[in-house]
């Protein structure tokens, strides 16, 4: 299993309405992990129109999308705070959290100031600006990994879609606990004797 190559998708202030409409599809794929249904698109019509007309940029679009019911129901309301933080890192920074300290910082921000403040902290961060600037859609990034376990965690998280793994435990924890979490249920990883011999 290898990290897939991601093409950077960028738009600037001179982009046409057609280019911006295509960019919206890329944003939805990254942030929502799918394209919205017709009824959901109606809820997002004003946000899309503002973006297509060039009234708002990528970062403003992302912050607003993260606070809409579609994103909150899918990733916040049906999961633990820790799992939400992990998904937000995946969606907005294109990586998994580096360690428990980073998770703790954003957990405190989420608890004390709410979803909007936490997402703003990610999208307004120096890391975000360096990685994506003002005009590039966030995407899964190939980074330098500090350890083999960090590399494995990033590989696992990259392939994970909403609901595919547990809603409670972030990948960093279920991996460290040697659990396999799928569809909301966690169980110990089974190791076969043939794997132990090799």
Image (cartoon, rainbow, N blue to C red):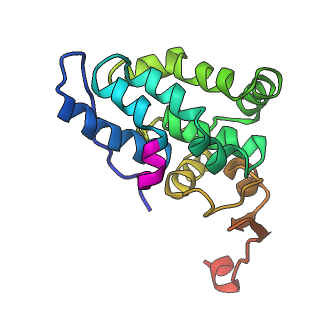
Residue at image point 82% right, 28% down: 111
Is residue 88 rendered to the left or right of residue 5? right
Image quadrant containing the N terminus: bottom left
Residue at image point 73% right, 71% down: 189
Q: Magenta segment, which residues?
A: 33-42
Q: In this orientation, which residue lies closer to the viewer: 86 or 115?
A: 115
Magenta region includes residue 40: yes
Q: Position of residue 31 (x, y in %)?
A: 48, 42
Q: Where is residue 62 in the image (x, y as percent from the top left)?
A: 48, 29
Residue 34 visible: no
Q: Quadrant of residue 16?
A: top left
The image shows residue 23, relative to residue 118, as above or below, that is: below
Residue at image point 74% right, 56% down: 174
Is residue 17 rendered to the left or right of residue 106? left
How many numbered marks are there? 0
Residue 66 visible: yes
Q: Where is residue 79 in the image (x, y as percent from the top left)?
A: 74, 50
Q: In this orientation, which residue lies closer to the viewer: 32 or 169?
A: 32
Magenta region includes residue 129: no
Q: In this orientation, which residue lies closer to the viewer: 146 or 35?
A: 35
Q: In this orientation, which residue lies closer to the viewer: 28 or 155?
A: 28
The image shows residue 17, relative to residue 54, as above or below, that is: below
Image quadrant containing the C terminus: bottom right
Is residue 4 rendered to the left or right of residue 109? left
Q: In which quarter of the image is residue 131?
A: top left
Q: Position of residue 162 (x, y in %)?
A: 59, 56
């Amino acid at each position: 299993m290898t990290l897939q190559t991601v093409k950077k998708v960028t738009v600037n202030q001179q982009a046409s309405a057609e280019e911006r409409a295509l960019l919206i599809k890329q944003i939805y794929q990254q942030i929502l992990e799918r394209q919205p249904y017709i009824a959901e698109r109606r809820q997002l019509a004003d946000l899309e129109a503002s973006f297509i007309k060039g009234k708002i940029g990528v970062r403003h679009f992302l912050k607003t999308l993260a606070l809409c019911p579609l994103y909150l129901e899918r990733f916040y309301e049906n999961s633990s705070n820790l799992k939400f933080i992990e998904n937000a890192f995946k969606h907005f920074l294109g990586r998994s959290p580096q360690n428990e300290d980073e998770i703790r910082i954003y957990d405190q921000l989420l608890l004390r100031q709410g979803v909007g403040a936490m997402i703003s902290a990610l999208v307004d961060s120096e890391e975000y600006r360096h990685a994506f600037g003002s005009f590039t859609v966030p995407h899964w990034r190939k980074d330098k990994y500090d350890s083999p376990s960090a590399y494995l965690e990033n590989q696992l998280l990259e392939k994970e879609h909403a609901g595919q793994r547990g809603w409670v435990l972030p990948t960093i924890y279920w991996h460290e606990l040697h659990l396999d979490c799928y569809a909301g249920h966690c169980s110990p990883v089974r190791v076969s004797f043939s794997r132990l011999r090799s």
